[in-house]
Image: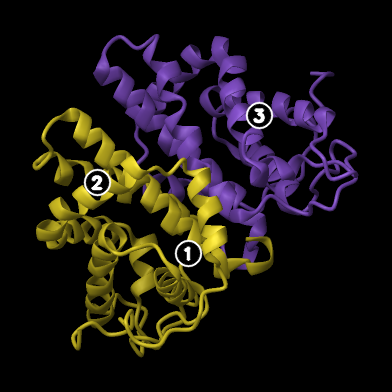
Chain colours: A purple, B yellow
Amino acid sequence: MSTLAGYTYDADLDRSPVSTDELALLLDTLAWSDADAAALARAGELLAPQVESVLDVWYGFVGSHPHLVVSFSGEDGRPDGDYLSAVRVRFGQWIRDLCARPWDQRWLDYQNEIARRHVVTMGQTDGVASDQTHIPLRYLIAFVWPITATVRSFLSSGAVDDTELDAMHAAWFKAVTLTVALWAQPYRPDRW
Amino acid sequence: MSTLAGYTYDADLDRSPVSTDELALLLDTLAWSDADAAALARAGELLAPQVESVLDVWYGFVGSHPHLVVSFSGEDGRPDGDYLSAVRVRFGQWIRDLCARPWDQRWLDYQNEIARRHVVTMGQTDGVASDQTHIPLRYLIAFVWPITATVRSFLSSGAVDDTELDAMHAAWFKAVTLTVALWAQPYRPDRW
C-alpha cells in the first residue's frame, strides 16, 4: 500500500457523517438486491485484471476535455502529471473496493475521505498547490454516465451471456450512482 | 395550462444562473451527440401517450418508500394528496419538455425554477405548510437510476429493434443525468 498516497482504508479514518442506516435507505432508493450484490461481485472479478485499461479510457476522456482536466492543474495552471498519476492509483482502488469490499461503516468512512478531497481538502493529499478549490458538483454528477457506459465493453468480454452482462452492468450503474450520492455529501451537508 | 400550478414555462421567469456555455460543457461531459438528440426526440414521441403510466410507476415507487414520500408531507406530517397531484402534473410536463423542447436559455430558466423548488422554495408553489425544507440531495442523485431504468419497458413497445431501443434508452439516461446535474445547482451554487 506504500505506493498508494492517501490510501488509508485500513488505517484510522474519521468516521463518516453518513450512517449505515442512511446507506440502507439509499440502497432501497436504488432497489438494490442480493442479485445486484452477486452481479457486482462477478463484475469485480472481470474488471480486476482490466483496471489499467479501464483507467486508460477514463483518463483519455478527462484528458481530451479541457474543462475536466483543469481540475488536475498544478501551481502553473497546467495539468500536473504527478497529481494525475496519484489520483489514478486511487481511482483504480475505488473500482476494486466498490466491487469487493463490504459496504459497512469502514467503507462509508473511506467514501467520506474521498468525498472530502473533492471539495474540502482538494489537492492536500498530494501536496498540490493550485487555484482549483473543488471538483464541480455538476461534473461529479454527470460522470455517472461515462463511468457507467464505458464499463460495459469490459464486462462483455467475460460475460456468460447477455443476461449476465445486463445484470452486471445494471449493478455497476447502481453502484456508481450510489458512489456519487455519497460523494455529494460534503458539498451541502445540511441538505444532503 | 391553467391546471398546471407553477408551470410558467412561457411566462416570465428568473434567468437561470447556469449559462448556455456551461450547458454545452455539461453536454460534452455526457458525450451528447446529434444521434442522441434524434433518439431522445423519438423517445419523446413514444413516451408522450404513456406519460400517465410512467408516472404511475414512479409514484408507486415513491409511495412505497416512507423515506421518499415524506417529502410530500403536509402540515400534519402525512402525505398530502393535493401536493402529490400538483407535483405529478409538473413531473409529466418535465418528461415532455425534456424530450421535445430545445435546450436553450428558456429551458435552463425553467430547470432553475424546478431546481429551486427542491431546496429554496420547497412547497411554496403549492402553498404547502410542512416541516420538509428540501428534497435530500442524495435522493435527487439516486433517482437517476429508477428514472432511467423504469423507462426502458415503455420505450421497448414502440422501438423498431434493439438498436433503436438501446439508442433511445442511452439518450434518456444522459438526459436524466443532465437534469439532475442542473437541479443540483441551488444546493451549492459556489461549488456547482
CB atoms at circles 2 and 3 under 8 Å apart?
Answer: no
Dot 2 or dot 1, earlier in sequence: 2
Q: Quadrant of residue A136?
A: bottom right
Q: Counting other residues with Cα less than 10 Å from the Cα at mark 1, is it few (<14), some (14-19), or many (20 or more)?
A: many
Q: Counting other residues with Cα less than 10 Å from the Cα at mark 2, is it few (<14), some (14-19), or many (20 or more)?
A: few
The quadrant of the rendering that contains the N terminus of chain A is top right
Query: Are discs 3 and 1 both within one chain?
Result: no
- Which of the labelled discs sits on residue B150, or is there none? 2
SS for callout 2: loop
Q: Quadrant of residue B108?
A: bottom left
- Which of the labelled discs sits on residue B31, or is there none? none
Q: CA distance from mark 3 to mark 1?
A: 27 Å
Q: Amino acid at mark 3?
A: Phe
The foreground one among A175 and A130 is A130
The chain under label 1 reads B
Q: Is residue B154 at all visible to an observer of this figure?
A: yes
- Which of the labelled discs sits on residue A91, or is there none? 3
Residue at coordinates 42% horizontally, 44% vertically from top-left?
Answer: B32
Say which residue label 1 marks.
B183
The chain under label 2 reads B
Q: Amino acid at mark 2?
A: Thr
Q: Quadrant of residue A27?
A: top left
Residue B113 % position (x, y): 44, 77
Residue B20 % position (x, y): 52, 63
Residue at coordinates 53% horizontally, 44% vertically from top-left?
Answer: B29
SS for callout 1: helix
Q: Amino acid at mark 1?
A: Trp
The foreground one among B60 and A180 is A180
Q: Counting other residues with Cα less than 10 Å from the Cα at mark 3, is it few (<14), some (14-19), or many (20 or more)?
A: some
